[in-house]
Amino acid sequence: MGGLAAVTAAPPAARAAARFEPAPGLAEAAKRDGKIIFYTANIEELEQEMINTFNKRFPFVRVEMVHLPGGQMFARMRSEISAGKLTADVVDHSDPGLMKTIEDAFQDYEPPNADAYDQSILVSRKIWPRLTAGWCIAWNTEIISKPPRTWWDVTKPEYAGQIAEVSGFTGGSTWIRVMFERKVLGEEYWAKQAATKPRIYPTNAALSDGLVRGEIGIAPVSYTIIAPKKRDGAPLGFVFPPEGVPVYFFAAAIPKTAARPAAARLYLDWCLSEEGQALLIERLGHLTALKVMPARSTEYDLSNVKIWYPEQAESDRLREPWLNDWAKVYGYRQ
């Protein structure tokens, strides 16, 4: 796993996603549960779109979302596990490697279509890649008349004072961007980009809001937060740089302590089904870890660009020292 590779999973044309049908008796058991508590490090407004669509089919399961950035979410889960009080029924975190370190807290779980997923991506058979997304360079079209087209463009002195990025310490998704920058673009990339004095935001959501408001003009950002804002009329442009698109996978699981296991399984089964993955692709610009994509996003088509994702063991080994190096270069304090 890892390195630059052309996207090959997408078929030449979209096909209709198979309709999700729950296992016999699961919907009735989920109805008795009535709700789930869902811990997520994903962008809150994107999760709400998923929840709203799920509830159109299964209105009897209320999803109570608890949202925190990745680092804070993991700290909360670990604290609750230590105290024997993990209250979530489903958790979804942006760092599979961190989730792997607490896999004993999760129950055995596989979705009905488990074999349809790329098994090389899994860090555990208990933990599943519900979300697959990546990074782009975005800009405010009302501010930037000559937008960047490559990662190296974001280091140009002419953009000084207009650039922002998300802290590498936010979670697994931002760490993947930081790792890509150093491993693929080289150590000098950080120094040149830091020289533009970028504004550091705590989350992708906060950065994208600042981009829309015109607080800053240009930013590397997760393109899944750009997709719905641009769709809804925000003055945003974006590009998938030719040097590569860092891709990250979220990691979803059901705790052993889940108080509402049937509703948890129903929600996660639906999210991981072709129906759930097609929604993520078509409306929110996601990729998928399914071997065959059940749909295609015309605007967010990555079939002709290079994607990059790390080998998990290398990512785990380099994370702490490289993030510390990144912080020193950017003068960032947690």
Image (tube, rainbow, N blue to C red):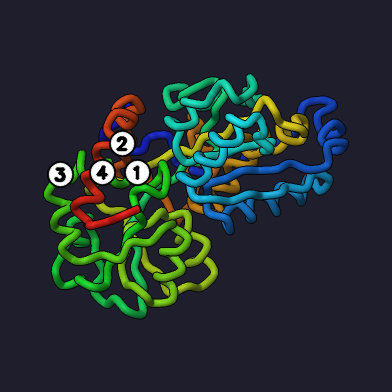
Amino acid type, callout 4: Asn
Spatial CA distance of label 1 from label 3 is 15 Å
Q: Does the image show residue 87?
A: yes
Disc 3: which residue: 186
Image coordinates of residue 2 in percent, x first then y, are: 30, 30
Which of discs 3 and 2 lies nearer the camera? The answer is: 2
Disc 2: which residue: 319
Which of discs 2 and 4 lies nearer the camera? The answer is: 4
Q: Nearer the viewer, residue 90 or 225?
A: 90
First of labels 4, 3 by sequence position: 3
Left or right for 28, reference 163: right
Spatial CA distance of label 1 from label 2 is 7 Å
Image coordinates of residue 293 in percent, x first then y, are: 51, 37
**Mark 2 Cα shell of 10 Å, populated few (<14), some (14-19), many (≥20):** some
Q: Residue at x 41, y 64 (%)?
A: 207
Against 234, residue 16 (above or below) is: above
Q: Does the image show residue 19?
A: no
Spatial CA distance of label 1 from label 4 is 11 Å
First of labels 1, 4 by sequence position: 1
